Image (tube, rainbow, N blue to C red):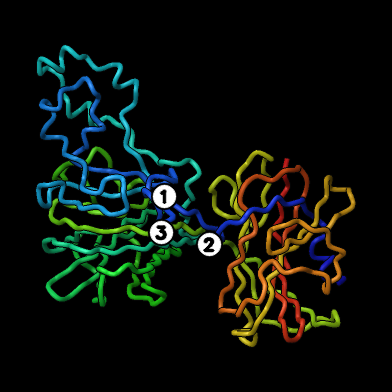
Amino acid sequence: MDNIKRNIIPFVVTLCISPFTLAETILYDGTGSPKDLDWLKYVQVPLPETIVPAFIPTTLVSSLIAPLAEGFGTATLNTDLGSGNTGYVGYTNYTYEISQDVIDSIDLAAVLSGNADIEEILFSGNFSIANESSPVLDRTTGFDVIFNVAVTNETSSENRAGFNVILISQDGQGIELGFKQEGEVDRIFAQSETFKEAEDTNVSDITTATDYVLTVKDDDYTFSADGIEILAGSLRSYQFDPEKSSPSLPFNPYTSPNFVFFGDNTDQANATFTLGTVTMRQHTPALGTAQATNASGDFVETTASFNGGISVKGAVPQTKVTQKLTDSVDVSGKILIDEADLEQEADIFVYAAYKETADAEAVFYMLDEAHNILLWDTKPENLVSFQEKVTLPPEQYVSMYQGQFILPGFLCISFGYRLTETGTLISNNQCIEVEIQ
């Protein structure tokens, strides 16, 4: 009991807990339209008619626009735009809009007389992040993009693919993966910096909905399908000139920070695909080695370790922050389980202590499975389960909080697991510290 008190007394705050997935931002939950959650947007080049100001006759810009893709507004897109391979179509966390100021400044008479540069007007739009709370993709800390997709039909030329995933980090390093069908063979490959096939692998079937995870850490990426790693390599700085692309692009996705795209990004291919759930997960920083006590409260050895942190307004998770009460936050963690405890049954717990001011007396809280906030007397035997009867995997993710805090003060958050058979309690030595102003 004393070791737990020492760990959490110095800091803390009352939590208003609501369910969420760990350190994850769900860009699309797999239901309705991918744009319903306001994270992903439909993009198309040539531009769809919807981007053209209503007073500009479409006959004047027919070479710059195209009909909406079959399946527009749904998770299933056919990217041929009715004309084969021409054009780019997909979903991204960016949006392209022509500002009202530009529209208001258009000389309608010049447009109608053919003396205005329509392409310049249409290509003057702003390509920007669709949601200001979109997670920062810091490759030093690391992050994952988790998605499900079925590419049911694909045709493409050499070095191209009808369905592609583009991922660009905060500092412009990234990776593009292409999904390709060649006769009876399905492949997934990485594009080189100059858009030639690099790392590649044959896969059993890209037409079946599959869960994929694209992980970035430091200078490298790994890519897995249904939990099995199938590709790995170095990140790239892509050499792309949007003006030389055919058709040309009014933006450069490869220099857009924190960018993700799912779809057809070439005029040398097309595909029909169905996008499932899409999630961004930021990795959390190390909290160091664990502390463990047996059922009698005596310290015992453990090789478990912890990661965890708090992300404020989509920023990179930190172990210690000062924030405003109105800030939105994510609090999450990961436990690297002691090998001796793998596959054992355990309860996951979350506890915290609150101090209204730095000199105030700490009040202790714990969270139950319904995310209710309960007072805790700091006795380990009275610590309730946050997740009950978990069979411990090598890495156990713990979701603790998403939203806004309800009180200013000082917060220290701890979490861990308790083995059902022995009662041994394993928790993080270093708590997640928050000062809320």
Report the Cα–Cα distance between label 2 and label 1.
14 Å
Q: Residue at x 35, y 56 (%)?
A: 167
Label 1 near label 2: C-beta < 8 Å?
Answer: no
**In the rendered image, the vertical position of residue 68 relative to residue 113, given as above or below:** below
Q: Which residue is mark 3?
A: 277
Q: Is residue 385 left or right of residue 361?
A: left
Which residue is at the front of the view, 349 or 170?
Answer: 349
**In the rendered image, the vertical position of residue 73 relative to residue 274, given as above or below:** above
Report the Cα–Cα distance between label 3 and label 2.
19 Å
What percent of the width, then of the height, locates residue 397? Answer: 58, 68
Q: Residue at x 19, y 61 (%)?
A: 161
The image quadrant that residue 158 belongs to is: bottom left
Label 3 near label 1: C-beta < 8 Å?
Answer: no
Residue type of the residue flagged with mark 1: Asn
Secondary structure found at label 3? strand
Residue 349: give its label. none
**In the rendered image, the vertical position of residue 67 relative to residue 19, given as above or below:** above
**In the rendered image, the vertical position of residue 209 relative to residue 54, given as above or below:** below
Residue type of the residue flagged with mark 2: His
Q: Is residue 48 left or right of residue 315?
A: left
- Comes first in the chain, label 1 or label 3: 1
Q: Which residue is mark 2?
A: 283
Residue 278 can be seen, yes or no: yes
Q: Residue at x 32, y 37 (%)?
A: 96
The image quadrant that residue 3 belongs to is: bottom right
What percent of the width, then of the height, locates residue 50? Answer: 25, 33
Q: Which residue is mark 1?
A: 258
Q: Which is more foreground, mark 3 or mark 2? A: 3
